[in-house]
Amino acid sequence: MMVSTTPCWKRRESRIAGLKPTAGSSALRWLGRACLGALLLLGGLGGPAFASSAKVVGAHAEVREGVLYLDVDFKLSLDKEMIEAMQNAIPLNLSVQAVIEQPRDWWMGQTIAEDERRYQLEYHALSKTWLITDVLEHEARSFSSLKGALRSLQRIRAWPITTAQKLHHTGHLVGRVRMVLDVNKLPLPLRFPALFDSRWALNSDWFLWSVPR
């Protein structure tokens, strides 16, 4: 498997309605077919739909040198529709969210700390490579296969969530983490169908993890 890392020093080109300017007529035709298929499924007229899925299978936190770091493992499954979308110049934007809360009996838990990591997964047709961009860190990694890219996305290590000092003088704490697909970054015609189409359901449930002191 080929992997390379490249700093991204400038923003990507703007997208019109969520599509790259370089997307050709074939991508637009695919988008039309995908939207029609999603609408037929919503109306009960299409064939059986498969499903994409995201699941947190493990999370572990530890404090090192005054910082709380979180390791997270996911299990991701992408439907063929999602893969075809990326092959037609439509990237997937994923958000991984972590929250530390102090539970309260009489109200919602009080948020002590929270953080988010955002990733963009896309396919480069010219180089025939899959690219993962860490949006906040401005760093990109390329892979020769989708399997390799997903293997990387499924494993987050040494994610700094907060300082240990922020956790002092608090009672019992609970950590939560999840992954969600940012539907608002999809092309406009896909956004509404994607909310109800299981082929685009790349959202995990919240996973609870222990907060060390």
Image (cartoon, grey):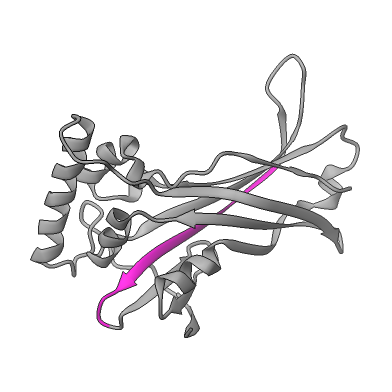
Range covered by the magenta-colored residues: 113-126
Q: Residue at x 85, y 48 (%)?
A: 212
Q: Residue at x 40, y 76 (%)?
A: 145
Farthest top residue in view: 106
Q: Measuring from the top left, give residue 132's x and y in whole percent.
A: 45, 69
Q: Is residue 137 magenta?
A: no
Q: Is residue 95 left or right of residue 155?
A: left
* Among the 4 quarters of the image, the one containing residue 196: top left
- Looking at the image, which is closer to me, 1 or 63? 1
SS assignment for the magenta stretch, majority:
strand
Q: Measuring from the top left, give residue 174's x and y in whole percent.
A: 76, 37
- Looking at the image, which is closer to me, 157 or 204? 204
Q: How many marks?
A: 0
Q: Is residue 131 above or below residue 117?
A: below
Q: Residue at x 26, y 38 (%)?
A: 193
Q: Residue at x 72, y 29 (%)?
A: 110
Q: Is residue 147 left or right of residue 17?
A: right
Q: Is residue 141 above or below residue 168?
A: below
Q: Is residue 41 above or below residue 91?
A: above
- Looking at the image, which is closer to me, 109 or 125? 125
Q: Measuring from the top left, give residue 91's x and y in whole percent.
A: 33, 60
Q: Is residue 121 magenta?
A: yes
Farthest front residue in view: 48
Q: Measuring from the top left, give residue 160's x and y in whole percent.
A: 71, 59
- Looking at the image, which is closer to me, 184 or 165? 184
